[in-house]
Image: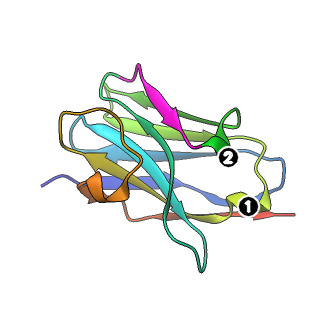
Amino acid sequence: QVHLVQSGGGLVQAGGSLTLSCAASGRYNMGWFRQAPGKEREFVAAINRPGGTTYYTDSVKGRFTISRDNAKNTVYLQMNSLTSEDTAVYYCAADFNLRGLTRNSWEYDTWGQGTQVTVSS
């Protein structure tokens, strides 16, 4: 059974930075999603198994960086220039299938426990 364990998150002022981590029990294509109160879960970023290909939603391009350390089976989301619009619960997810990166939440097979990110203005 694949487990994803998230860490990081918390409260930060607008313009600040945070890094989220997601430790997996294997190596998969990985994604980050977020869900703000009253809103649907939305795609943030994804990275392929080797770590050479990444994919971002437009609203975070240039501010967020997804990366991975395959020796540790850990994926990171470095978030810079945070705004109140980034406030949400953030989830990592693993896609077990051998395919290209996807932004569709239903194509991910297992999820982390979620971590709150709150940006104060």
Q: Is residue 14 visible?
A: yes
- Residue located at (87% from left, 63% from top): 121
Q: Is residue 21 above or below residue 53?
A: below
Q: Residues within 10 Å of mark 1 (few under 14, many from 20)?
A: few
Kindly identify which residue carries mark 2. 59
Three-letter amino acid code at the position of disc 2: Ser
Give how far across and how far down residue 115 sits, in percent: 51, 63
Q: Which circle marks residue 85 in the picture?
A: 1
Give how far across and how far down residue 113 sits, in percent: 38, 65
Q: Residues within 10 Å of mark 2 (few under 14, many from 20)?
A: few
Furthest residue to the left? 1
Nearest the eye: 15 or 61: 61
Asked if disc 1 and disc 2 are in contact, CB closer than 8 Å, the reply is yes
- Residue located at (32% from left, 22% from top): 50
Nearest the eye: 58 or 62: 58
> Which tag is nearer the camera, tag 1 or tag 2?
2
Specify start and end residues of the magenta stretch as a single range: 51-57
Q: Is 59 situated left or right of 70 in this image? A: right
